[in-house]
Amino acid sequence: MWNSFKFVKEGWIDSYMVSKMSSKMVGSNNLAHAKRMVQQLRVEASIERIKVSKASADLMRYCGENAKYDPLLMGIPASENPFKDKKPCTIL
Amino acid sequence: MAAQPSDTLATLKTESETLKTKLEEERAKLHDVELHQVAEKTEALGQFVMKTRRTLKGHGNKVLCLDWCKDKRRIVSSSQDGKVIVWDAFTTNKEHAVTMPCTWVMACAYAPSGCAVACGGLDNKCSVYPLSLDKNENLAAKKKSVAMHTNYLSACCFTNSDMQILTSSGDGTCALWDVESGQMLQSFHGHAADVLCLDLAPSETGNTFVSGGCDKKSCVWDMRTGQCVQSFETHESDINSVRYYPSGDAFASGSDDATCRLYDLRADREVAIYSKESIIFGASSVDFSLSGRLLFGGYNDYTINVWDVLKGTRVSILFGHENRVSTLRVSPDGTAFCSGSWDHTLRIWA
């Protein structure tokens, strides 16, 4: 039987209160499950990948190009940030 | 001539192991450098002064989820006591309030039009409430049940229109629904335990989304086919939150293993871990600043850690909440971010 792990583990809620799902994914048909696993792994193994150096360079370039538009990064002055005003402001 | 079932199972298991090894080898071949090494030449970030600019008080119990409206000022939040509130974050006024028929409303989302909100939790459903301009109107009367799962709803979000909703559930699946008819358009199977979170790829990137779950796995899905196209299993505990990097080429996750991690989709691997020995409590919620340079993480130790995404270092730690931070989102224009907590409040930081 499937148990809602998160709730029981966290102790947020009495395990009896959690609705239990009838076993759908766990072990009822091992063969079908194993076939699906193999098919899934074939899909994942076959994708095209790029080097981490290239991927990193691209992430850095994106940050660099957009840094000036990032208010939390650049720290925009109070006059331009509606949340930085001390008094609630009326936005027209 | 039928083969013995046990033989076939054994063959499949062997093939499974072989493929897993091959996957790791292929990924390792391209692991020529670390992100933080490439980022060494980037200028270090200065000191950050971020403060609480607004505190939204009104929930009677733990805040579990929040979402910004595209207008950059309204926020919807949901709580353990079943209340869903829509706030004007500039004035801190409550504009709408709905009481759900269930407790633990773990998921809420604002519709792209700003005219409706979706929410759900222990009722196993996702319901949509059109927001009325008439404050006296009973929102609950117009409620529309859209999604039905067989366990709790953990997250929901509208796609690029008010017409479709993506959901994740404690039943281990995600699903795409048509709001008008309530029909399931696609289901996503592959997680081996509760799915706790999801995020839609930025619209330029195409029809994919990422999910994370109690099986310590994050999965990237093709929305049209229902196929899991990539999966990552490097966290050591539940993944509570996933969020795409703004370019759509990567995503971050926050986990009960007290780390946040960055996965690059084109390199198909984890490229950064955001952790410190002093951080021992789980990360519940993560989001990026507009440029993707900063990663904000809300933690179960009541703090918010701000990470330099490229260099992998922590640039700031924010105190203020008096209980777990359970949810965190950056505003649509990046001017602020909002955190929700088990201390019943939401805070806007800038």
Image (cartoon, rainbow, N blue to C red):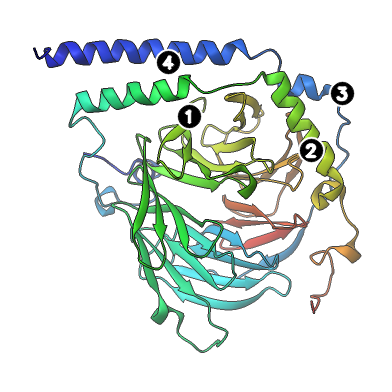
Q: Is residue B234 above or below residue A1?
A: above
Q: Residue at x 63, y 14 (%)?
A: B30
Q: Which residue is mark 2?
A: A63
Q: Are marks 4 and 1 in contact (CB under 8 Å)?
A: no
Q: Quadrant of residue B71?
A: bottom right
Q: Which residue is mark 3?
A: B41
Can residue B60 be seen from the camera position used here?
no
Question: How much space separates mark 4 and mark 3, taking CA atoms?
Answer: 35 Å
Q: Viewer-proximal residue, B43 or B219?
A: B219
Does label 1 lie on the same chain as label 4? yes
Chain containing mark 1: B
Give a yes or no on whether discs 2 and 4 share a subunit.
no
Residue on which disc 1 sits: B231
Which percent across, then down, holds residue A73?
82, 46
Cα separation, mark 1 vs mark 3, equals 31 Å
The residue under label 3 is which amino acid type?
Lys
Q: Earlier in the sequence, mark 4 or mark 3?
A: 4
Real-space CA distance between mark 4 and mark 1, rounded to the nearest whole angstrom = 12 Å
| Label 3 residue SS | helix
Residue with the mark numbered 4: B20
Task: Say what amino acid the circle numbered 2 marks.
Answer: Cys
